[in-house]
Amino acid sequence: MRDEILNRIEEKSNIPPLPDILIRLEAKIDDPGGELEEIAQLIETEPVLAGRLLALSNSVFFGAGREKILSLKGAVLRLGLKLVLDLAYTLELPRIFSGVGTFNQEKFWKHSLAVGVLSRQMAGKWALERRVGEQAYLAGLMHDIGILVFYFLIPKEYRKFLREVQGVEKPLEILERETFDICHAELGARFIKKWWPLDDEVVVAVADHHRTLDPVQDTDLVVAAVNIGNAMANTQGWRTGLGEPGDTLNRKYLVARGMTLETYQEFIEEAQEALDSAQHILDD
């Protein structure tokens, strides 16, 4: 079954491409000569995305003041370019995968968003480079994308699999390997690497988000942030509802990174506040 699944990825089948708006928006934002007006005009070509970004720029969570923003240029200016890109990914990915599978997609994407937020916050504590946090957010948002790819490639088999493993006290990724000889982490990473133009750091973090971290040898901060972010999300109850979460919080790794019980509790409190507000991003 593994070979058949991987062959179907190569053929692409009916898996959706990364929306053109995201590719073009990322190129514009990464371009040092990119103009704010051009970025706003690009977003305007996608009315749904434009409307949501305008609404979010006027929400309390994203720094809305007394003056209401009425233009996309003003929204981009208030939110900042990198946050605009993060929000665009957050809003567009659920749209392209809408209707896939028979599970609760709202719960799935709220878990993904939680992992993205937690990963970015954790990376921000470990790394000075802003790009590490940006990659951690994107990898956290996409870490379970392989579940949706399973549904696209082998919908009947995967639907049957989820029914049969319901209530089984084993992590989903282990059950997937036992049944298909590949798990959603590897499948998602292979799909992204093949078809979506994203950084290798994001691909590796998606592939390794279930791997047990070694406090000494694991120095990839994006991988570590997503791994820890996923375990934290599950520990705090922000779960997909698909199978049993198998990852326990790697306290040894956190201690090695200087986190105490007290600072961990502070981090969770900060994250809870951020997530309570961030969940509104996905609300219609």
Image: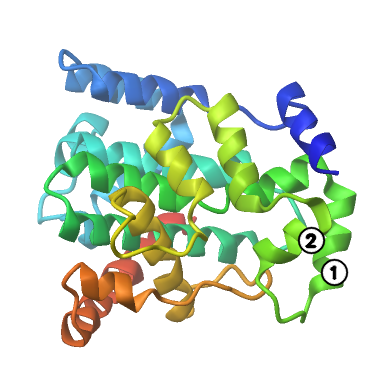
Dot 2: element: helix
Q: Quadrant of residue 215?
A: bottom left
Image position of 233 with respect to 70: above or below: below
Q: Which mark is residue 163?
A: 1
User: In the visual, does 39 lie left or right of 231?
Assistant: left
How far across and how far down the image is residue 151, in percent?
76, 48
The spot of residue 16 in percent (x, y) is: 65, 31
Q: Is residue 196 left or right of residue 250?
A: right
Q: Indicate the secondary structure of the residue bearing disc 1.
A: helix
From the viewer's side, name the closer residue of 14 and 125: 125
User: Which label lies toward us, 1 or 2?
Assistant: 2
Residue 18 visible (yes or no): no
Taking the image as drawn, is residue 94 in sight?
yes
Decide: is 263 above or below 253: below
Instruction: Judge from the rendering whether residue 55 lies leftward or rightward of residue 207; answer left or right.
Output: left
Q: Label 2 is placed on what type of residue? A: Glu
Quadrant where the N terminus sits is top right
Query: Who's the residue at 53% across and 42% down the image?
Result: 93
Question: Is 86 situated left or right of 282 in this image?
Answer: left
Residue 20 lies, with reference to residue 15, above or below; the image says above
Using the image, determine if residue 93 lies above or below residue 30: below
Q: Give the x, y percent position of residue 233.
A: 43, 71
Residue 86 lies, in percent from the top left, at 34, 42
On the image, which quarter does residue 192 sit in?
top right
Task: Return the residue at label 2.
Answer: 178
Q: Inspect the image, locate mark 1, and give the three-letter code of the amino acid beneath it.
A: Arg
| Point 36% across, 44% down: residue | 87
